[in-house]
Image (tube, helix red, strand yellow):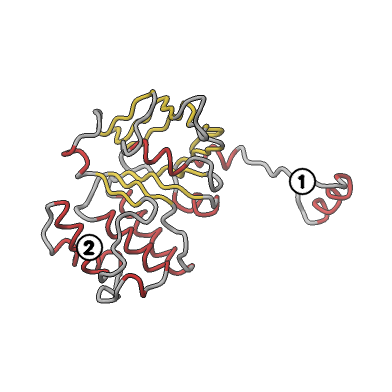
Amino acid sequence: MNILNCSNVCYGSNNSSFVIKKVSLALNEGETLGFLGKNGAGKTTVMRIILNVLPPSSGQVDFFGGPLRRDTFSSVGVFIERGTIYPHLSVKENLLIHCGLRGLSGNCALDVMREVNIDFGSKVVRTVSAGMRQKLGLAIALLGRPRLLILDEPLTGLDPAVIDESLALLRKFAANGGAILFSSHQLSDVQRIASSICVIDMGAITYSSSMRELANNSALVMRCSDPIRAIEVLRLAGFD
């Protein structure tokens, strides 16, 4: 089943400082799309357009075969630009507030804390590390067992062990039929979890394929001052 379809979405005008140009992407059940691009490429802007935080100037976005509605949004878990996190409250209190906003029982907060392995629920958010805040953001997105996750650089600031833990959690989510759109500027993160990849640069999609196609057609491009010497070094190192 198609979960998310973004077709020819544009944002801005000739007078805008930043323009999104005919972005198209799609996600089905069980798929994970890695949205790759350097800082400032337009990843977060596209996610905000998808969620109708920013109205597109043209194009169409469909969730589960139709436009985003209030009842549809209950099936979407979001963590963009640190989301709505209250730094003066504890981690658990933040989760309880989001449960209330979504009409969920407080038990959902306890369930997701166990799922994400949050053992610092009593700590005030402003006193915890950036990595712990990222884990809180992921927990907020997972409240209510959504069918689609939209995550803006969810692995930023995490140490390697927590990255492995988070990736395992996201793989399990996709294996159970959930769909994930997550952005990153690290290809290594995308390669470890994504089933497909979409590269954005200066507001436009420059490359899109499955990870299998990428692996079969990948190449290393090098720019250097002495190409002949570079070829010699690469050959000595075992590269063709």
Give percent across and percent down for residue 106: 13, 63
- For the residue pair 178 and 186, the one nearer the viewer reads as 186
Q: Is residue 179 above or below residue 5?
A: below
Where, quadrant-wise, is the N terminus in this rendering?
A: top left
> Up-down: is 199 above or below 101?
above
Which residue is at the front of the view, 60 or 149?
Answer: 60
Q: Position of residue 65 (x, y in %)?
A: 25, 28
Q: How many marks?
A: 2
- Residue type of the residue flagged with mark 1: Asp
Distance CA(mark 2)–CA(mark 1): 52 Å
Name the residue located 28 percent from the left edge and 69 percent from the top edge.
88
Q: With 236 as the anchor, is 108 left or right in this view? A: left
Residue 64 image point, x, y percent: 25, 33
Q: Which residue is located at x 76 percent, y 46 percent?
A: 240
Identify residue for label 1: 240
Q: Secondary structure at mark 1?
A: loop
Q: Quadrant of residue 6?
A: top left
Tell me if 144 is positioned left or right of 154 in this view. left
Local packing at callout 2 (Cα closer than 10 Å; few below 14, some 14-19, many 20+) is: many
Whole-percent x, y for residue 137 in the image: 33, 59
Name the residue located 56 percent from the left edge and 36 percent from the top edge.
Answer: 202
Q: Which residue is mark 2?
A: 95
| Numbered label attached to residue 2 | none
Q: Residue at x 27, y 69 (%)?
A: 91
Disc 2 marks a residue whose amino acid type is Leu
Q: Which one is nearer the viewer's eye here, 59 or 217?
A: 59
Taking the image as drawn, is residue 181 in sight?
Answer: yes
